[in-house]
């Protein structure tokens, strides 16, 4: 089918064959070429979910420590630090 989009060629190496066999158990009615697209989509969803969870964990860590050490530095701490800086 004509297209202006990039095409990708994938050789069915043992690792790719294994991935397709696993995917065929999940989506038994799909052709092996369709299984590749299913795997790409499932992989994208897994990566997005993982990235979202990592972001949420970082935000929770920031929230948990926010303001926790406010009493460590006095009101003049920044001014004291700046005294040693050249203008």
Image (cartoon, grey):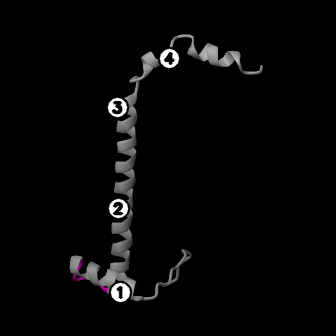
**Is residue 28 highlighted in magenta?**
yes
Separation of marks 1 and 2 at Cα, in angstroms = 21 Å
Residue drawn at (51%, 12%), measured in percent from left and top? 74
- Residue positioned 50% across, 84% down in the render: 9
Disc 3 or disc 2, which is closer to the eye? 3
Residue beneath disc 3: 64
As helix, strand or loop, the secondary structure at mark 1 comes to helix
Query: Could you say which disc has been placed on residue 17 in the image?
Result: 1
Looking at the rendering, the stretch of residues picked out in magenta corresponds to: 27-31
Task: Identify the image quadrant of the C terminus.
Answer: top right
Category of crowding for the residue at label 2, using alpha-carbon neighbours closer than 10 angstroms: few (below 14), some (14–19), many (at least 20): few
Which dot marks residue 45?
2
Q: Nearer the viewer, mark 1 or mark 3?
A: 3
Q: Earlier in the sequence, mark 4 or mark 1?
A: 1
Q: Secondary structure at mark 4?
A: loop
Q: What residue sits 28% from the left and 78% below the top?
A: 23
What is the C-alpha distance between the residues marked 1 and 3?
Answer: 45 Å
Callout 4 touching callout 1 (CB < 8 Å): no
Check if mark 4's residue and mark 3's residue have beta carbons within 8 Å: no
Q: Which residue is mark 4?
A: 73
Binning the other alpha carbons within 10 Å of mark 4 as few (below 14), some (14 to 19) or many (20 upward) gives few
Foreground label between 1 and 2: 1
């Amino acid at each position: 089918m004509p297209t202006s989009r990039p095409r990708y060629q994938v050789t069915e190496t043992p690792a790719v064959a294994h991935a397709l066999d696993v995917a065929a158990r999940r989506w038994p009615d799909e052709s092996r070429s369709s299984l590749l697209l299913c795997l790409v989509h499932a992989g994208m969803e897994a990566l997005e979910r993982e990235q979202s969870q990592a972001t949420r964990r970082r935000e929770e860590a920031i929230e948990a420590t926010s303001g926790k050490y406010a009493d460590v530095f006095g009101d003049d701490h920044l001014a004291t630090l700046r005294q040693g800086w050249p203008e």
